[in-house]
Amino acid sequence: MNFQSVNSPLEQFQIIPFIKIEIGNLLLSFTNSSFFLLLTLSFVLLLISLVTKKGGGHLVGNAAQSLVELLYSFSLNLVNEQIGGLSGKVKQSFFPIIFVTFLFLLFCNLQGMIPYSFTVTSHFIITMGLSFSLFIGITIVGFVRHGLHFLSFLVPAGIPIKAAPFMVPLELISYAFRPLSLGIRLFANLMAGHSLVKIMSGFAWTMLCMNQLLYLIGALGTFSIVLALTGLELSVAILQAYVFTILICIYLNDALNLH
């Protein structure tokens, strides 16, 4: 067994092993991605514990409690609005997974906006693992609720029977691409925006170090662009968490209610 510490600086888009563990041919590494995943989870648990009754919750909420209550109400309304045809109690049985997914994505995305941090959701394997695991769970829920009748989603309502052999493969491909589109959308938006901010920041800093008036004016203009892009990225970070969550609700509603 070989333990090797790695003292590389954090980089925005590169998975760097902090601790490299080799057991024979098996490589187990604790990377910066693993570290920031644990950091996000710890922060979410700490924030929620601060607003619980035993953790210091108050009848008149403070800022942290108001934030968690706002996120809770937002997620609950999302479930009630997007999942129809069921009783409130049945709907709310799916609320915990929706709430946790939204919180996880929101704080992962926002954490990536902190300088010298790491954007977990800018990695394809993370977003795809999350989207496929949720989608497999939704499919299992559909089969548990409807049995083999769940396969009727492959035949859209109102089409002629003769068209079914052509529609079934198309609907199956469309259904299979849902988790792929979920993961790619989240990964691509976070990766592209953060890459653009990083490139523009490096370009502005290089011009600022030129010590010439023309380059200084250009650097100030570029820094203004970076500031605007940072605000845009902050909006994208919140929006992508919302889009991912609402699509999960829509897919869950399709699995529960079929056509």
Image (cartoon, grey):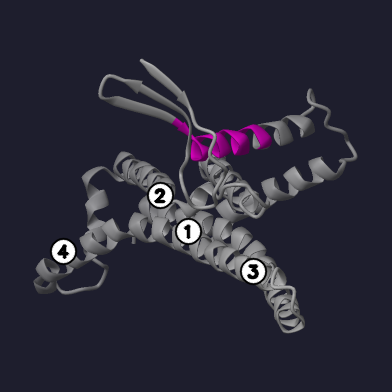
Residue 4, percent across and down?
Answer: 45, 24
The quadrant of the picture occupied by the N terminus is top left
* Extreme residue in the right direction: 60
C-alpha gap between disc 3 and disc 2: 39 Å
The quadrant of the picture occupied by the C terminus is bottom left
* Extreme residue in the front direction: 211
* Extreme residue in the bottom direction: 214
C-alpha gap between disc 4 and disc 2: 22 Å
**Mark closer to the chain start, 3 or 1:** 1
* Label 3 crowd bin: few (<14), some (14–19), many (20+), radius 10 Å: some
Q: Which residues are magenta?
A: 30-43
In the structure shown, which secondary structural element does the residue marked by tag 4 occupy?
Answer: helix
* Label 1 crowd bin: few (<14), some (14–19), many (20+), radius 10 Å: many
* Mark 3 residue type: Thr
Instruction: Identify the main secondary structure in magenta.
Output: helix
Q: Is residue 82 magenta?
A: no
Residue annotated with mark 2: 131
Asked if disc 3 and disc 1 are in contact, CB closer than 8 Å, the reply is no
Which of 111 and 131 lies nearest the eye of the viewer? 111
Residue annotated with mark 1: 186
C-alpha gap between disc 4 and disc 1: 26 Å
Residue annotated with mark 4: 169
